[in-house]
Amino acid sequence: MSFNTALSGLNAATADLNVKSNNIANVNTTGFKESRAEFGDVFAVSAFGTTSKTAIGSGVVLQNVAQQFNQGNLEFTENALDLAISGEGFFAMAPTIDSGEVIYTRAGEFGINKDGFIVNSLGNFLRTFPIDADGNISATSMSAARPLQLPPTAGAPESTSLLSIATNLPSNASPISNTALATPATAGTDTINFSTGTISAGDTVTVNGVVFTFADATTASTVDSATAVTVNVDFTGGATQQNASDAFVSAFTAAVTDTGATGTGSALSGLSAANGGGLTATITDTAAGLALTVGRTVTASDATVSQNVTGSDATTGPILAINPLDPTTYTNSTSATVFDSLGNEHIVTTYYQKIDAESGGVGDNQWQMEMYISSDDIKVTGTTNTVTDGATTLVKLGATTRMGFNSDGTLNSTIPDPITMTFAAASGTELASGAADQTITLSLAGSTQNSGSFSVGGLTVNGFPTGRLTGVDISEDGLIRATFSNGQAIPIGKIALGNFANVQALNKIGNTAWKETTDSGPVIAGEAGTGSFGQIQSGALETSNVDLTKELVGLITAQRNFQANSKAIETNNAITQTIINLR
């Protein structure tokens, strides 16, 4: 009997050594759970289920090799598909794409197979719960979980419908007016004009950027293509008339433009009486540096008619229209990119002009804003909405917007409200890309006017171009998003986790995987971060929970136990030999 007792001890020590050796062998196995040998003593029991008070045990028996599911350390990696569960739960896997069988693992080393499915190194498919567009799941049963396939590599575009720009407009910027009237260039009233018909009161001339009105019609003369242009000059208030051949006029060189023809000359000549409307000329005084822009108003009610200026009078003209090709007509500008239904990008530029408080009686803290786009982006069908300098053509979008600010710098109002820009054939702004018609609403909410410099404090735009798949992003709750080069992140599934009432009763099938058993209880399906389930860490792996130092010490203990049981056998053998040698 003592031989059998010692032999059972040898077997137990051997089993303990085997368990510890297996633990040590898997110290680097991802998701491995260490095992522990559990032993029980052996007694001879009577038919009545009792033992004698003097009963001696009959050795030891291996009762169970129990895995320990305590948390392993997390090792961080550079792969977003390396997943670790921090807490309770198992990844649910499918052996084949259409299999109803479920196996469970803590090893989160995942990748993408040739068909775009998320799989582990054995080719098992990661099961996920289906979700809606907001990432919410409707069912958490394991039967509802399916293998997950990444979407196609191209993300569908979406056209822009809302653009928000919040700017700070400098309150100390110089206001821009249509005409700046200042002190005349010489003493008295300077009125210089020419006409292809009779010079009339109200005709104007601009001297060094200062507009003067021709007030004396009595000195007017009639010109035609056969005579030189008559320039009427009144330096002292008297009527003094000089012809193109006189010294005063011949001191100028001119580039002359009328409605129908152009010409140059040392004198103002060559103008046709048949082309009178809108006649203008730019003249440079070569002697004194006095720049003259000579013009004739069409009617007395025309918006460009200026007030008479005498002596040191100074005033302003009406609000000046923004010309995006002329920086002197706007104060600041900024650009934003919008997208059409085909995903094409279009750059829309907004131009801001600070309005002179005296122009049109608009008051203080008033700005106007206009939106323009390159004609290359538009099927231009006319010239109504276009501005060009010959080399560049821009198309105006929507109406001119008036921005009014409060005395504390906050935005008071915008007119119109809402501000819209329409891309459609009916408005002459059909997109050249062939995309669908669209209307974009522009919001200026959050804009301010203060002493700071011009800046864009906020710019947001919805819509996006076509994108290519760049990767996946997995959150702590297991939500998987496909990320695209256009900045979009689309939810495509949520990782299914399983747990059991008795995890130690799971059936070990190798490759750090388990199957459900009767003793483990049915699977409890759920999502990470809810109930008893832990959170998922992307870019990390759970290492083996084996404590190598403890296992090495355990080896020494198991070796000592084996040697002790061997010694018991040796002692029993010596006693037996002694009995045999009795004579």
Image (cartoon, rainbow, N blue to C red):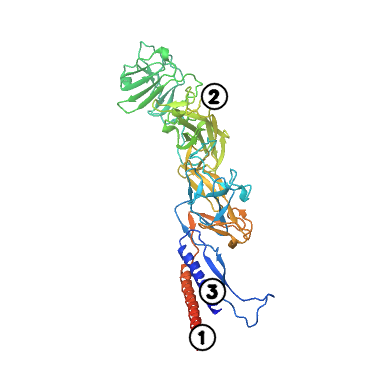
Mark 1 to mark 3 CA distance (whole Å): 24 Å
Residue 99, compared with residue 251, is above or below; it is: below
Residue 227: x and y in percent read 35, 12
| Identity of the residue furthest to the bottom in this view | 583
Q: Amino acid at mark 1?
A: Ile
User: Which comes before the other along the chain, label 2 or label 3?
Assistant: 3
Mark pair 2, 3: CA separation:
97 Å
**Extreme residue toward the right, this view:** 48
Q: Residue furthest front?
A: 583
**Marks 1,3: beta carbons within 8 A:** no
Give the crowd class for mark 3: few <14, some 14-19, many >=20 residues within 10 Å.
many
Instruction: Give, as a three-letter code, the residue at label 3.
Output: Ser
Amino acid residing under circle 2: Ala
Q: Quadrant of residue 98?
A: top right
Which numbered disc flags the more N-terminal residue, 1 or 2? Answer: 2
The tag on residue 426 is 2
Residue 8: mark in rendering:
3
* Mark 1–mark 2 distance (CA, rounded to whole Å): 120 Å
Which residue position is annotated with label 1? 579
Q: Secondary structure at mark 3?
A: helix
* Mark 2, other Cα within 10 Å: few <14 / some 14–19 / many ≥20: few
Mark 2 lies on a secondary structure that is helix
Which residue corresponds to the image point at 33% horizontal and 17% vertical from the top-left? 244
